[in-house]
Image: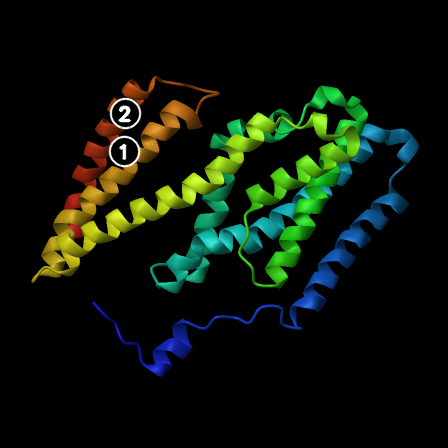
């Protein structure tokens, strides 16, 4: 089914910013100047002898980590929320609020496995001195943050995962040579970069086909949506609950996949019962 959009509609909602516009360079320079100013202020107002090297390293990591978080928000979160805002399913303010809450929850609740892989799965921490390893990881964090900032200035949606994996590998090789890298783990990560987009495309196509056949092409689309949408929400609740119980909450509770799926099915049934009537009325 072809959909024609008028020029005003295109102008209003489908503008694509030009890459590498000159106006982005001052923002990049301003952010770098602010980071340098924060570091300079710390050098002038904190007693290094009293705090010690470890505290200095922690302070520097916190500053760079905040800078990295800002770039993740400007690039990764914008990529995640772009479809919802572009389709006007969410306003920009609502998307920012949702991202602020659930990006943090995702990192705190379900980010332990990824953190462990970044910390010790890509390179061998024992191949360098502990003090050198701390500086190595700080260098990797700063390199990934700078790359994300540059990519954002060029309007290029890139992956933070790719950036941080490459940065950790590069810093590790510079510190300890090629032998420091766990190549088997890197191969698995790279394979996931190929498999994930393919599977995502397949599932997206299947869901779009299901929505078109069950809602869009029906004579009474509102009634069809009232029947189908609660089922899709319940399916999402089942997948989310199953993942959280089997992987995401591993530090608190870790159920076998069959038990997690069963609990997820109970949650999905409850979600379906709670959403069916409101969606039908809407």
Image-quadrant location for residue 30: bottom right
Q: Is residue 83 above or below residue 10?
A: above
Residue bearing the label numbered 1 = 238
Q: Give the mark nearest the N terminus, 2 or 1.
A: 1
- Screen quadrant of the C terminus: bottom left
In the image shown, does 184 or 50 lie closer to the viewer? 184
Residue shown at 47%/31% (left/top)?
A: 110
Label 2 secondary element? helix
Q: Position of residue 109 (x, y in %)?
A: 48, 31
In the image shown, does 224 or 270 lie closer to the viewer? 224
Residue shown at 40%/18% (left/top)?
A: 254
Q: Position of residue 200 (x, y in %)?
A: 36, 45
Residue shown at 72%/19% (left/top)?
A: 126
Q: Residues within 10 Å of mark 2 (few under 14, many from 20)?
A: many
Mark 2–mark 1 contact, CB under 8 Å?
A: yes
Residue bearing the label numbered 2 = 261
In the image shown, does 47 or 205 lie closer to the viewer? 205
Q: Residues within 10 Å of mark 1 (few under 14, many from 20)?
A: many
Q: Is residue 255 above or below residue 111?
A: above
Q: Is residue 104 left or right of residue 128?
A: left
In the image shown, does 219 or 241 lie closer to the viewer? 219
Label 1 secondary element? helix
């Amino acid at each position: 089914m072809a959909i024609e959009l008028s020029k005003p509609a295109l102008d209003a909602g489908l503008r694509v910013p030009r890459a590498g516009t000159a106006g982005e360079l001052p923002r990049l320079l301003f952010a770098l100047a602010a980071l340098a100013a924060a570091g300079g202020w710390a050098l002038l107002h904190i007693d290094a002898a009293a705090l010690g090297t470890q505290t200095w390293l922690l302070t520097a990591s916190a500053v760079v980590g905040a800078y990295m978080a800002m770039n993740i928000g400007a690039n990764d979160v914008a990529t995640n929320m772009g479809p919802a805002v572009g389709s006007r399913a969410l306003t920009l303010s609502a998307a920012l609020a949702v991202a602020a809450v659930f990006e943090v929850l995702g990192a705190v609740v379900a980010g332990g496995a990824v953190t462990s892989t970044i910390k010790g799965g890509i390179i061998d921490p024992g191949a360098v001195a502990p003090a050198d390893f701390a500086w190595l990881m700080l260098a990797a964090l700063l390199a990934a943050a700078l790359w994300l900032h540059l990519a954002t200035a060029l309007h290029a949606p890139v992956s933070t995962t790719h950036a941080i994996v490459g940065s950790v590998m590069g810093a590790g090789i510079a510190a300890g040579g090629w032998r420091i890298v766990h190549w088997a783990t890197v191969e698995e990560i790279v394979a996931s970069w190929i498999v994930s987009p393919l599977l995502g495309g397949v599932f997206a196509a299947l869901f779009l086909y299901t929505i078109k056949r069950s809602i869009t092409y029906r004579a009474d689309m509102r009634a069809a949506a009232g029947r189908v949408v609660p089922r899709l929400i319940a399916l999402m609740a089942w997948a989310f609950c199953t993942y959280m119980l089997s992987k995401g909450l591993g530090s608190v509770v870790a159920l076998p996949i069959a038990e997690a799926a069963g609990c997820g099915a109970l949650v999905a049934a409850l979600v379906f019962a709670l959403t069916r009537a409101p969606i039908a009325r809407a």
